[in-house]
Amino acid sequence: MRAFVRRSDRIRRWLTAALIAAAGSAIASSAGAAPQRVVSMNLCTDQIAMLLAAPGQLVSVSDLARDPRMSPMADRAQDYPINHGRAEEIYLMRPDLVIAGQYASGPTVAMLRRLGVRVEVLPPAEDIDAIRAEIMRMGGLLGREDKAAEVLARFERGLILADSNADRGRAALYYANGYTSGRDTLAGTILTAAGYRNVADDLGITDTRSLPLEMLVMARPDRLITGAKWPGQSRGEAILDHPALARIAPETAEVTDRDWVCGTPFVLRAIEALK
């Protein structure tokens, strides 16, 4: 029965992808010819644009794309001029398409549109279906639907390989300043995909919010998962060194932040790291 449900799940995924692909093609058709000079001004759109763009089509990515602590494609980003999300610098690049994230600077987006530049705003992908949709939508925007389908197929194969019925126990995500993430977040999705039950679910937390250290200790997770620490001294990160955490969850995994930051195919690496 379980195998049947899993096969049905995969069929549903592919049907969803096909529908999204059709929608992406419609976007590309309505926009006319594929854009020739594309600027991405968001770390997450940078990653998918670099995966899908034709040679010479992507002319700039955000400055964060070159940061190896934040970007899983930092090496490839060295090949692109960077931008800092300012309307003036982006306009001078003569783009025929600018791709921004949902939380991009409102004035920058507004000014570029007033100057006649086409700007598409993509929401963050917080779950697996949203990652699929983001890949296909980017493919439609760039006129690269075939490449998007290829990337999506690799992603689907990776998900199947990562799929496991193993119950790895209860885990807690815990970050600087005592924040945790629930099931409606990208981090929560990664945790579930790796076979863990999220302690945040037991506490009624579905988003990202503060979790008092005392409540975390009483929840007694089997594993504690934190982000990589940044250079320097941060009072916000000091809570992660509290001796109580080492005692309740000696199996602590420090996971590289760059594979968790954005909803892209690189979340597969985060899932595997947890195993």
Image: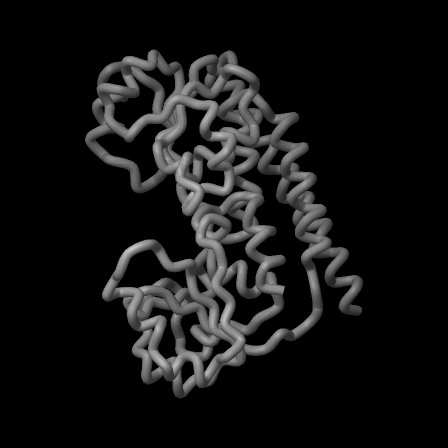
Where residue 81 appears, x then y in whole percent?
39, 22
Q: Quadrant of residue 111?
A: top left
> Residue 105 vs residue 208: left or right?
left
Q: Could you tell me which quadrant the C terminus lies in?
A: bottom right
Q: In the image as oriented, which residue stretches furthest toward the front?
A: 232
Q: In the image as oriented, which residue stretches furthest toward the bottom?
A: 218
Residue found at x 63% / y 44%: 16
Q: Could you tell me which quadrant the N terminus lies in?
A: bottom right
Where residue 237 appears, x then y in whole percent?
30, 65
Residue found at x 67% / y 52%: 159
Where residue 64 appears, x then y in whole percent?
37, 37
State whether residue 234 is above or below residue 23. below
State whether residue 61 is above or below residue 92. below
State whether residue 9 is above or below residue 18. below
Most foreground residue, 265 or 115: 265
**How many marks are shown on the rendered structure?**
0
Residue found at x 74% / y 56%: 8
> What colour scheme does the image use?
one colour
Most foreground residue, 130 or 259: 259
Where residue 134 appears, x then y in whole percent?
51, 39
Most foreground residue, 42 or 153: 42
State whether residue 253 is above or below residue 217. above
Residue found at x 53% / y 80%: 222
> Residue 4 vs residue 115: left or right?
right
